[in-house]
Image (tube, coloured by chain):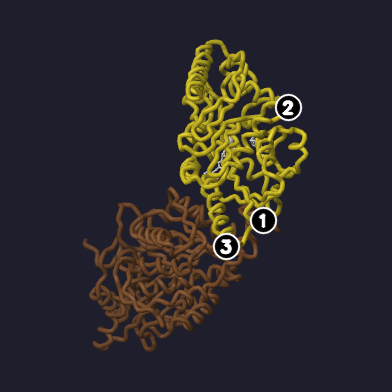
């Protein structure tokens, strides 16, 4: 179905306002947009890993979730939602619960790339009918901006500090979307907030309505951790895509497709300079570090284009 | 007519699971409980069960999937041992505090390290404060009977807690015994349908499970959890009575063996109770007034039953098949001593650590313990705080 921005935005939100996330946070934008893709008549059970999203949306005795919701721990959203899905298979076969349920797990990059990786990999390999959404803000924000394996090289975090002897994180960023695609799940995609959120919506709809396991990796900036002004979020996301730092692509039944190829690929500085976490890279003498990041972005982009040929 | 069979403990529990046909099983292999998910997989393949089996990639995920499934409204089960149980540790607390009556077949095995696949109780005893009901079996018959009762106990409206049905690895899980199975229709009628009041898949009422708890509420939630554990005492007794009507077999919090006039007693858990009964029969023939208290239910702890059973006893040996490394003995030792404090006067209480990592426990070892506690009474000496039984120096 063609994307109708107005129609979609007019659907009732499945995450209430009044949650406790920071103003300008990417996470609730991602969650709202993904949940808009559930047909209003369908039921859902939502799971969240322990993270900023979880602590701010389900403070007892309140819940911001308009669907049934479960949080169990940090590293197991994949397994927890699979338990719910298994229960649904058992109970709907007995006619005890309606058929039209959707199962969606959210996790931060820490709960997805790192500690929850095993549980996620298991869920993907079992190909259970669920969607796992990583809202990737490239660090452990809830515990105070520590590095994760999704943190880009040379980012300043509280456990990859910059100083006289350090230019921030020394390791490369893991390409989780590719790792999940290697599970040969029916659908894996990477997206962020661009324009009227069409890309995010369409990928969410595909993920939710493709039978079997699906994975969405949504770059969801965090103004505190990335150190930019909250209102600049759309610009930051745009530059992530225009520089090819965060390409928009999807892998559907093992067919790789790049959804957007910038006509004029922007230099990586255009993404880096918007954020305080990369400020040190613009000091005199660090030009080679930026050049290295550029080489890495170019290299990954070339590899992706080859896969999508 | 009950069905007479020759089965191992693992076979018996798997058969109980088949009869109950739960909605969901999520499990991961580890010796000596591995056979249980294997049997279930085969039963499902044969069309003998309709359970949804989740072949998870770890025990952390088996317990996580059980948490998700049970919260969703499904009767859920798992099986594990040793390192597998340790790997679930975080999730055990979450299952209990979310008040999810998951049933676990726990086949007791020593915890690493050093790595050892044989029996002791270090795994489930390590999880004794996780908020799970724990019921221990002496043999395959009890493993089967307990498992069926555990489902009812956990799901009871005054309880809503997860339950571990424990049996000793290899000694019980792999040894084939003559036993009686109950007809499937009777088992099904006994456990009944699982119809929780609150569940995620209820389209008429949304539910939030596992929410963030502030200091304002956390303690009240813990109080409710401890009350549920207290309630479990009566529920366990009531369900045992009901179970007797379909099986003819009696169960309670503890089992007393020749305790009526006992002067010397032993408190023990699990399969070694069988060995101890044999030793006690021999001692009785020799004129020693020996008796046994077998702790069937360790959580909730049967403190009143134990104190009452020890009234009039001169000395008791409390046998721990694990060390808590408190340098003060094992968990059963500590809790039995706490149970008798101020209730039983002048009782000499000795704590033994025995049978670790599959170390054989024989009739002569048990008799030696009775000799030692009788000697303490005679000499008027106090026992060592705790000691290892039959250890090579
Ligand atoms: C087993 C375990 N280890 C550590 C933590 C502490 N912890 C809670 S949330 C979190 C970081 C979450 O980071 P991420 O998944 O990226 O989500 P974000 O908060 O950044 O949105 C950490 C380290 C925990 N709750 N459980
Ligand atoms: S710290 Fe960052 S991720 Fe967490 S709520 Fe605030 S903006 Fe969002
Ligand atoms: Mg994060």
Both labels 2 and 3 in a single chain = yes
Q: Which of the chains bears the disc numbered 1?
A: B
Chain coloured yellow in this rendering: A
Task: Please give left or right for residue B49 compared with residue A42 in the image.
Answer: left
Dot label at residue A94: 3
Whether residue B326 appears in this view of the structure is: no
- Number of residue marks: 3
User: In the image shown, does A1 or B376 lie closer to the viewer?
Assistant: A1
Query: How far is the residue under mark 2 from the one under mark 1?
Result: 34 Å
Q: Which of the chains bears the disc numbered 2?
A: A
Dot label at residue A76: none
Q: Quadrant of the N terminus of chain B?
A: bottom left
Please, which residue is most extreme toward the front here?
A1
Within 10 Å of disc 1 (Cα), the crowding (few <14, some 14-19, many 20+) is many
Residue at 27% of width from left, 79% of height from top? B279
- Pointer 2 with pointer 1, Cβ within 8 A: no
Q: Which of the chains bears the disc numbered 3?
A: A
Query: How far is the residue under mark 1 from the one under mark 3?
Result: 21 Å
Within 10 Å of disc 2 (Cα), the crowding (few <14, some 14-19, many 20+) is few
What residue is shown with label 1? B207
Please, which residue is most extreme toward the left here?
B392
Q: Colour of chain B?
A: brown
- Quick check: which quadrant has ligand 1? top right
Above or below for A309 versus A139: above
Residue depth check, mark 2 versus mark 1: number of the one nearer the observer: 1
Q: Quadrant of the C terminus of chain B?
A: bottom left
Sequence-wise, the earlier of marks 2 and 3 is 3
Expressed as whole percent of the image width and height from the top left, the position of residue A48 reads 60, 45
Both labels 2 and 1 in a single chain = no
Residue depth check, mark 2 versus mark 3: number of the one nearer the observer: 3
């Amino acid at each position: 179905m063609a994307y109708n921005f107005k129609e979609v935005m007019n659907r009732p939100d499945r995450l209430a306002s009044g949650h406790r996330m920071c103003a300008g946070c990417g996470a609730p934008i991602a969650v709202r947009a993904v949940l808009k893709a559930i047909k209003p008549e369908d039921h859902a059970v939502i799971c969240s890993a322990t993270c900023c999203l979880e602590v701010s949306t389900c403070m007892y005795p309140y819940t911001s979730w308009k669907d049934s919701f479960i949080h169990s721990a940090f590293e197991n959203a994949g397994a927890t939602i699979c338990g719910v899905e298994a229960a649904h298979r058992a109970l709907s076969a007995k006619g005890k619960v309606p058929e039209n349920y959707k199962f969606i797990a959210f996790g931060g990059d820490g709960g997805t790339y790192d500690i929850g990786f095993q549980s996620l990999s298991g869920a993907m390999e079992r190909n259970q009918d669920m969607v796992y959404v990583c809202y990737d803000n490239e660090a452990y924000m809830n515990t105070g901006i520590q590095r994760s394996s999704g943190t880009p090289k040379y980012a300043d975090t509280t456990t990859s500090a910059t100083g006289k002897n350090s230019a921030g994180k020394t390791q490369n960023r893991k390409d989780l979307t590719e790792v999940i695609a290697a599970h040969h799940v029916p659908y894996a995609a990477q997206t962020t907030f661009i324009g009227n959120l069409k890309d995010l919506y369409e990928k969410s709809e595909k993920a939710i309505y493709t039978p079997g396991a699906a994975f969405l990796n949504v770059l969801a900036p965090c103004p505190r951790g990335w150190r930019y002004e909250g209102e600049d979020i759309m610009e930051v996301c745009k530059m992530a895509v225009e520089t090819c730092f965060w390409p928009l692509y999807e892998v559907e039944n093992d067919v790789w497709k790049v959804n957007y190829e910038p006509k004029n690929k922007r230099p990586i500085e255009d993404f880096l300079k918007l954020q305080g976490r990369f400020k040190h890279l613009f000091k005199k003498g660090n030009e080679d570090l930026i050049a290295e990041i550029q080489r890495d972005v170019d290299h990954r982009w070339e590899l992706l284009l080859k896969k999508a040929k | 007519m009950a069905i007479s069979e020759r089965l191992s403990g693992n076979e018996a529990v798997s058969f109980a699971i088949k009869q109950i046909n739960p909605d969901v099983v999520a499990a991961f292999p580890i010796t000596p409980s591995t056979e249980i998910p294997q049997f279930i997989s085969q039963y499902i393949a044969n069309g003998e069960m309709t359970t949804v089996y989740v072949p998870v990639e770890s025990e952390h995920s088996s317990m996580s999937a059980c948490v998700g499934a049970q919260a969703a409204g499904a009767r859920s089960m798992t099986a594990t041992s040793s390192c597998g149980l340790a790997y679930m540790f975080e999730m055990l607390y979450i299952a209990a505090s979310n008040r999810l009556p998951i049933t676990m077949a726990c086949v007791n095995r020593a915890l690493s390290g050093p790595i050892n696949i044989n029996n002791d109780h270090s795994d489930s005893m390590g999880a004794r404060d996780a908020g799970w009901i724990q019921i221990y079996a002496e043999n395959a018959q009890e493993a089967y009977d307990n498992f069926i009762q555990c489902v009812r106990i956990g799901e009871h409206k005054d309880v809503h807690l997860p339950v571990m049905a424990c049996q000793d690895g290899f000694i019980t899980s792999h040894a084939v015994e003559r036993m009686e199975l109950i007809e499937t229709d009777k088992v099904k009628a006994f456990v009944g349908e699982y119809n929780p009041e609150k569940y995620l898949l209820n389209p008429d009422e949304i539910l939030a499970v596992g929410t963030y708890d502030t200091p304002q509420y956390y303690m009240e939630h813990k109080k409710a959890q401890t009350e549920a554990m207290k309630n479990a005492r009566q529920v366990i007794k009531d369900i045992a009575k009901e179970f007797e009507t379909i099986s003819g077999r009696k169960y309670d919090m503890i089992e007393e063996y020749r305790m009526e006039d006992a002067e010397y007693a032993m408190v023990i858990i699990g399969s070694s109770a069988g060995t101890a009964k044999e030793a006690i029969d021999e001692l009785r023939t020799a004129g020693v007034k020996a008796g046994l208290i077998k702790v069937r239910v360790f959580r909730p702890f049967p403190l009143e039953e134990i104190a009452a059973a020890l009234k009039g006893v001169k000395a008791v040996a409390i046998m721990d098949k694990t060390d808590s490394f408190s340098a003060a003995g094992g968990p059963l030792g500590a809790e039995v001593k706490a149970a008798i404090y101020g209730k039983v006067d002048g009782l000499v209480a000795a704590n033994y650590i025995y049978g670790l990592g599959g170390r054989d426990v024989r009739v002569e070892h048990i008799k030696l313990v009775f000799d030692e506690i009788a000697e303490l009474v005679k000499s008027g000496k106090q026992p060592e705080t705790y000691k290892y039984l039959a250890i090579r120096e």
